[in-house]
Image (cartoon, rainbow, N blue to C red):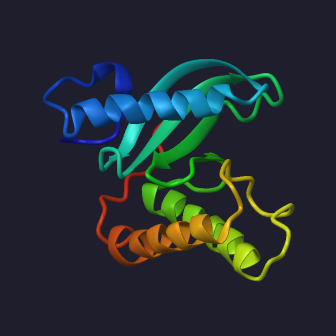
Amino acid sequence: MKYPLAFKSITTKTEFYSEVVEMNKKASDYLSSFDWCRQIKTSSIYLNLGSTLCVFLFEIKNSASNDDNFLWVVVGDIPSLYLDTHGPKTTAEVLEDYTNLADNWVVHIKERKSVKDCYPFMTEPTIEMADMLEKRSLFIKNTLINNIENISLKL
């Protein structure tokens, strides 16, 4: 399968089809939870590991900024995250940014510091969540980043 794929063009032959449908809904719901996301126009999948991890690129109508209409969204068995496209331009860069933000959050939790200045992951700031996120972040860094197809942003 060649990525990126426009979500509207996926079929039952797409790897992890039912999981990708679920992950796209999870990513859409996540973005829609923000007041500034007025409308989701399109989505494309850039990395597909089913319910374990997906990276999507969404085009939205953003009421807070005309310059941030394209957003990366990372979802899976990890806390969801969005990033604008002014920073990361490839799937590897998206995952590197994810792990850097996750690692910062984990350090704050483990050192019993406030997460107020960390990326606002929508999850409870507990040691259990920090341990889980730390394990997932290590997996992404040690296994995925150097072994995935590094797809560049296509707008």
Q: How many marks?
A: 0
- 34 sits left or right of 58 in the view: right
Which residue lies at the image location 72% right of the left edge and 35% below the top edge? 68
Q: Residue furthest bottom?
A: 111
Q: Give the residue at x 70% y 68%.
A: 105
**Residue 103 to residue 71: above or below:** below
x 70%, y 80%: residue:
110
* Horizontal and vertical percent position of residue 94: 53, 57
- Residue occupying the far left of the picture: 13
Q: Quadrant of residue 7?
A: top left
- Vertically, is 119 above or below 38? below
Q: Quadrant of residue 108?
A: bottom right
Q: Position of residue 43 (x, y in %)?
A: 47, 28
Q: Picture coordinates of residue 148 (x, y %)? A: 31, 62
Residue 79 falls left or right of residue 46: right
**Which quadrant is home to the N terminus?**
top left
**Residue drawn at (48%, 46%) of the image:** 75
Answer with left or right where residue 153 lies relative to residue 107.
Answer: left
Asked if 16 appears above or below 63 in the picture, the reply is below
Percent position of residue 132, x then y: 51, 67
Name the foreground residue: 33 vs 2: 33
Q: Is residue 16 above or below residue 114?
A: above
